[in-house]
Amino acid sequence: MFYTGCFAEAWLQPRTCTHANTSTGEIIEVHLSVTSDLCVTPLGLERDADLQLLLVGGELLKVRSSSWKKNRFYKLQEDCTTMWHESHRTFKRNQTFSIDEIESVRKGRQSEGLQKHTEAHVEDRCFSIIFKGRRRNLDLIATSAEEARQWVNGLEKIISNMKKLNSHWIFNCMRKADKNKDNKMTLKELKHFLRQINIEVDDMYAEVLFAKCDKSNSGSLEGPEIKHFYDLLIYREEIDVIYGKYATTGEQMSVKDLLNFLLNEQREVATMEDAVRLIERYELDDSAKQKNHMTKDGFLMYLHQEEGSIFNPAHKEVFQDMSQPINHYFISSSHNTYLMEDQLKGHSSTEAYIKALMKSCRCVELDCWDGAHGEPIIYHGHTLTSKVLFKDVIKAIKEYAFKTSEYPVILSLENHCTLEQQKLMAKHMISILGSALLTSPLEDQMPTAFPSPQDLKGRFIVKGKRLNKLDAVFSNTSPGVEEDCVSEEDEAAETSNSKTDSNGQKAKKSKIKLAKQLSDLVIYCRSVHFSGFEHAKDNQAFYEMSSFKESKAVNLAETAVNAFIHHNMTKLSRIYPAGSRTDSSNYNPVPLWNAGCQIVALNFQTPSKEMDLNQGRFRSNGVSGYFLKPDFQRYPGTEFDPTTLTKGPWLKRKTFHIMVISAQQLPKLNKDKCKSIVDPLVKVEIDGVPADTCSKETRSIENNGFNPMWNETFQFDIQVPELALVRFLVEDYDSTSQNDLIGQYCLPLTSLQNGYRHVPLLTKHGDVIPSAGLFVHLMLLDAK
């Protein structure tokens, strides 16, 4: 958005000022000059040496392969939001990318490309720019270690500040609309600008708006006239109504007014001290702050911070009991983690592991096969997917496993290797992971139950086949075998079992030889075949777990759900997608969570509603990747059945009221067409037990992605709130084809806050859309 206060004057003379964006409620320092493009310099960085290096620019060596390494000039644009770089392509000699497109910056040879195509002696000169989505990494080498450090530090500072601001894009739209760079706006430029920010207006309205602001009758807007235009543009009627209802002290909110708002509208357990704290934190007007008053700008600032978010800020930290046995938690889990794309010819990469781990995935899969030169590799066997070295994957996992979450990571091995390469797998894990690798039970005697996530902080747990029972670790009489045959790994075994011989009989289970060195690393997650719930109850130890393909798991969840829930009270279950999903699509994880399954593995590389639900489920509890199951899924004796919902402690009926009020700054979907404006509608979905699963939607608003307003109210009756997820979906309505996704956001029902709240919007890949959001009113009440 534009920024208030000094915005208009900035078009008249050079100056620096600090103000709040009245649409998104954020603070920014703005540096503007009449002789140059509008430039946003992050607060406190105007004299930063690292930032100055980026603004001056420099030559860096771009690396694509061992033979393709070329010098290219890179430079941060004056808007501090765009990076320019030269290109030797015939038709694209000057190219740019937005800082918003960057997911992270890694110093050193920390990308697959740099590890493969550079030597160790250039480690301190290397860095990589990692983009959001599936865009290829940008691997670069600076001329010195100091220069590399400055590039990395400068980029990280810009990225960090932009995440805090989250609303600079309208500056770029203004600059693009000002075609002749005269810091004025003609009627033609005004129309172009409105399209840039996703508002379609007819010529008559544009002319009326222009005439209302053109006080000088000069035929162009400048100075205060642009400020007037800006104020008309960002006006939010709904905020005026809410603020006016409570601002009873000289048209400002007193501390008592604010407390009344917190108690009556936000339904918070708040005190006068809490209200004073909010004024001190978010009020920008010093005179109002001295009186303990909050202006409308300060009020909007508060609504856009975490205290005004739909997501309970207390749940951004780990708030659940983490001392329960590990099988009492849902665990964020990935299938075919090594793949960046589909499972027929997709690219295998360490980057896929890094992306999953950074999204708090706590169970990753490694499909291990014999590789050349004696080195085991990871890929989707018998397909055209590319291959990556096992040891490189373990190194990447070691580096990134605990950056987002400190809780344990399970390494789910699909072992197809010969004995010698299995021994090397064990050696690599021991040498690379070191003491973080769990190689024996935590107890000094045979355990009878799982340790907790708290007990296992910072540890790696290997899941796979084991030659003998865990009791052998504590036995002085059994030396153990060096190798033996075991049934094939989970998914391969399922594939083999589905095959028939020439007589139409099911093929016998295939066997592989297992090395003792690899077997001994399996402690709490020994893979065994599932032969029924009664058999498991009578014969399986707590640490022996089964994997289920989705169809079998869904069938059990439908026909024997209570038995499945009881099974998962003492053991772990892993669910994986059907082999027929060659496009790496996903299945619905919710019915499996309803059955108490912990490791519901999804294809993280595939954007989908199912991944939205997964990220929503694990958004809470500090993004730890662990979410404590409800007590009725943890303790014996429960009669909980999500399909029939007989009376019990799980029935905590709630009525969920929601008013979808408005949206702000929804992005254009077709940026190549200047007249392409979205027609947004909002869907609100509940996903949980079958009785709770429901979806409702607003009408569409024609040609307004900037500030559409709905004021539509919905009601949902919730039976089991502890298993319910709320998903907001904003789509571009199309009467002739499927609606296009604009943005989405998902969270547990139990993690939302009541009252007037802003809802951030994410892309299909789960990245925040800068400036975009919904404004809603929520009320979750006990059902009468």
Image (tube, rainbow, N blue to C red):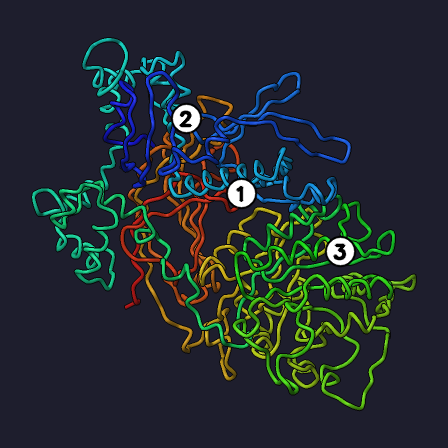
At x 25% / y 47%, what residue is drawn?
Answer: 282
At x 57% / y 36%, what residue is drawn?
Answer: 147
Near mark 1 (Cα within 10 A), the count class, few <14, some 14-19 or many ≥20, is some
Mark seen at residue 438: none
At x 53% / y 38%, what residue is drawn?
Answer: 150
| Relative horizontal placement of residue 343, taking residue 744 as reference (left or right) | right
Disc 2 marks which residue? Answer: 172
Near mark 2 (Cα within 10 A), the count class, few <14, some 14-19 or many ≥20, is many
Q: Amino acid at mark 3?
A: Phe
Outermost right residue: 502
Mark seen at residue 390: 3
Secondary structure of residue under mark 2: helix
Residue 205 seen from this side = no
Q: Amino acid at mark 1?
A: Glu
Label 1 and label 3: CA atoms lie apart by 25 Å
Please state which of residues 251 and 531 is positioned toward the viewer in this rendering: 251
Disc 1 marks which residue? Answer: 103
Percent from the top left, x then y, of residue 524?
66, 75
Percent from the top left, x then y, of residue 283?
22, 45
Query: Nearer the N terminus, badge 1 or badge 3?
Result: 1
